[in-house]
Image (spheres, rainbow, N blue to C red):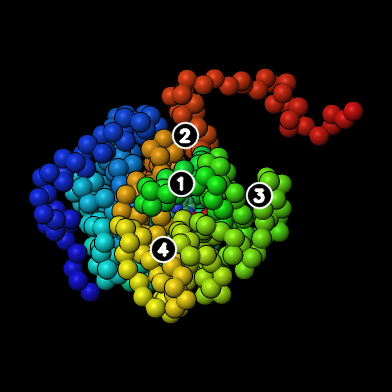
Amino acid sequence: MTNAAPITDRIDDPESARESGRQKIDWAREHMPIMRALREEFETDQPLAGERIGMAMHVEATTAVLTETLAAAGAEVAITGCNPLSTHDDVSRALDAHDSITSYAERGVDDEAYYAAIEAVIGHEPTITVDDGMDMVAAIHDDHPELIDSILGGCEETTTGVHRLRAMDDDGALEYPVFAVNDTPMKRLFDNVHGTGESALSAIAMTTNLSFAGKTIVVAGYGYCGKGVAKKAAGQNAHVVVTEVDPRRALEAHMEGYEVLPMAEAAAKGDVFVTTTGNRDVITAEHFERMDDGTLLANAGHFDVEIDLDGLSDLAASTREVRPGVQEYELSSGKRLNVLAEGRLVNLAAPVALGHPVEVMDQSFGVQAVCVRELSGTAYEPGVHDVPDDLDREVAEIKLDAEGLGIDDLSDEQTEYMGSWDHGT
Ligand code: NAI
């Protein structure tokens, strides 16, 4: 395995990269009132003084704001990417210039360099981990179990990471506490739904310069992300087809007015396919064979296994890049299928992708920040933990305040009524 060095040692013209990254981070912070409020509190209280935080996240501007907020709370932070294609090198460089932050993230690295960078972060001997997809927790358990006793806990950002952690916990293999940040209302109802809906579609549009209006968009998986993609695609005048394996989610999609079909039938109808299942082999050879010439294939799920690219390569007579971020596979029949961003999550891995809108990440990372603060102050048992509801509410209240929105308070009588069982007709 290669030894990873901080990004500053590896990119050309680090100075101008630092400036461009700094500009992106400053813009993001300007639109992240939750992070600004928490940073003010953290600077005063220094809740993370003495902690070392290891992060594996999509390294773009909003993540940088979280990283700097944790550093402002007194922590030493080491960070790398959680996907080989989602890092913004200029942002990574700007982070690495911070006295208390070391960044190993670099875009376009191969598997070996990707895992070497995770190793390098672990080399800082983190006391708290922050993951998006669970790769760091896995590497610590597999290769550095000696660190586990000194780890207070971790935070997990995404659905796939939480699934993996719960599976690990069920097997009795998870040896430190991890908060399922993904599962909070403040994260999942906004980030997964609106964030993925908006950013996946805009990344597809910017990558291809093609319109959704009048097209048929097949959304695989009608979970939180799929709901967002379907809703925003319908809002752009596309005809939406949903594929599912869960009967209740399929019915929900039907009642929202979408067409529901098995993938084998949807394959023949779609112009654009977006997978959002967190599962593997959702679109495979039998489906590719039914698709029309020119079909666009994109994935918004965490890993690049939803579209079976090996199966597509086997069918293809030739392949070439037709635009940055668009790989055309020409089948022996002459039919051409276009895969975006190498089947990696399109809203972060396409060359023009920016990730979720800043306001959405303000909420997700607000929850991350209060969870890290919680781990530094309270001991939790090993295992996956739901985020305490008062922490999620705290973030919601900061956001409401920033938006200038007021809500009502429950009266004592209402509180008593809601908590009683003896008020009948
Ligand atoms: P979810 O669990 O709410 O939804 C997944 C849906 O896919 C479920 O309804 C499930 O029944 C369905 N499904 C599973 N296998 C299927 C198959 N073979 N065919 C059709 N449907 C199938 O999960 P959520 O929160 O929507 O996340 C989905 C994926 O997106 C995860 O990998 C998650 O980590 C990732 N994610 C990506 C983001 C991004 O920025 N692109 C943001 C947040 C999450």
Three-letter code, disc 2: Val
Three-letter code, disc 3: Tyr
From where the camera sits, is residue 169 visible? no
**Residue that protrudes farthest toward the front in the picture:** 334
**Circle on res. 387:** none
Give the mark toward the camera: 4 or 1: 1
Q: Which residue is mark 3?
A: 258
**Circle on res. 395:** 2
Q: Which residue is mark 1?
A: 211
The residue at 46%/62% (across/down) is 294
**Circle on res. 339:** 4
The residue at 38%/66% (across/down) is 328
Q: Residues within 10 Å of mark 4 (few under 14, many from 20)?
A: many
Q: Secondary structure at mark 2?
A: helix
Three-letter code, disc 4: Val
Q: Report, in whole angstroms, how far the alpha carbon at label 3 lies from the one at label 1.
A: 19 Å
From where the camera sits, is residue 21 visible? yes
Three-letter code, disc 1: Ser
Is residue 136 rendered to the left or right of residue 124? Answer: right
Q: Quadrant of the N terminus?
A: bottom left
Is residue 325 rendered to the left or right of residue 4? Answer: right
Q: Report, in whole angstroms, how far the alpha carbon at label 4 lies from the one at label 3.
A: 24 Å
Give the mark toward the camera: 3 or 1: 1
Q: Secondary structure at mark 4?
A: strand
The residue at 50%/32% (across/down) is 396
Give the mark toward the camera: 4 or 2: 4
Q: Report, in whole angstroms, how far the alpha carbon at label 4 lies from the one at label 1.
A: 16 Å
Q: Secondary structure at mark 3?
A: loop
Q: Quadrant of residue 398?
A: top left
Q: Residues within 10 Å of mark 1 (few under 14, many from 20)?
A: some
